[in-house]
Amino acid sequence: MRFVHAVVHGIALGVLATSTFACNTILGVEEVELNCHVAPELAAPPAAVSTLRNVVEDGDPASEVRVDLVAMATLYIRLWDGYGEHDALIAGTTYPLTSDDGSVIDCGICIELDASFNTPTGTSRWIYAARAQGNLTLTVRTATQVAGSIQNLRFRHVTDEGIEVDDGCSTVIRQLAFDAR
């Protein structure tokens, strides 16, 4: 069901993105300033708040870590045992993000950044999903605490269904530690 929803929205957004690109090309617009709603590189403030929530989706349990980075930007780390080319995700291990982790449908280590911003019509939200590069190190993983760090993650702008938006928007997190309870 998640896949079908993703395909339908992806086709619609692909048509919109293609028409915008074509319009800019016809008009000779080559250097358009990007407004990606996130900085090219993000760093967590020293007192970034992390919270843990245990979730179940399609019958599969996962640990979800939420890290509030800056005003209106939140990082989510979801850990799904047995997905994304990983077995059980246990403490004391460093996991490289796999090609499956770069997909919101197949990921076992699902990392995304939600950037909210105000528009004249209300609040909008852009999603940035981690590419298949970088590492997650888990130091603690229990039902009541998940702690660790992420290193050298690159994010790209995606739709709600995880389809990459071809707008040139991306960001990087070099290092971020978290301790969610």
Image (tube, rainbow, N blue to C red):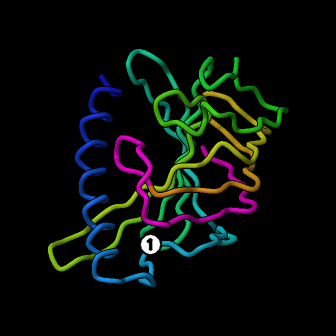
Secondary structure under tag 1 reads: loop
Q: Is residue 122 above or below residue 157?
A: below
| Residue 71 magenta | no
Q: Position of residue 116 (x, y in %)?
A: 36, 66
* Residue pictured at 56% horizontal, 66% vertical: 69
Q: Position of residue 48 (x, y in %)?
A: 61, 65
* Quarter occupied by residue 126: bottom left
Read off the magenta span: 158-181
Q: Which residue is mark 1?
A: 36
On-image quarter of the N terminus: top left
Residue drawn at point x = 36 percent, y = 83 percent: 29
Q: Which residue lies most toward the left here?
A: 121
Q: Nearer the viewer, residue 115 or 159?
A: 159
131 left or right, relative to 58: right
Going by the numbered disc 1, the residue's amino acid type is Cys
Q: Is residue 163 magenta?
A: yes
**Residue shown at 78%/41% (left/top)?**
137
Residue 175 location, x and y as percent? 75, 60
The quadrant where residue 23 appears: bottom left
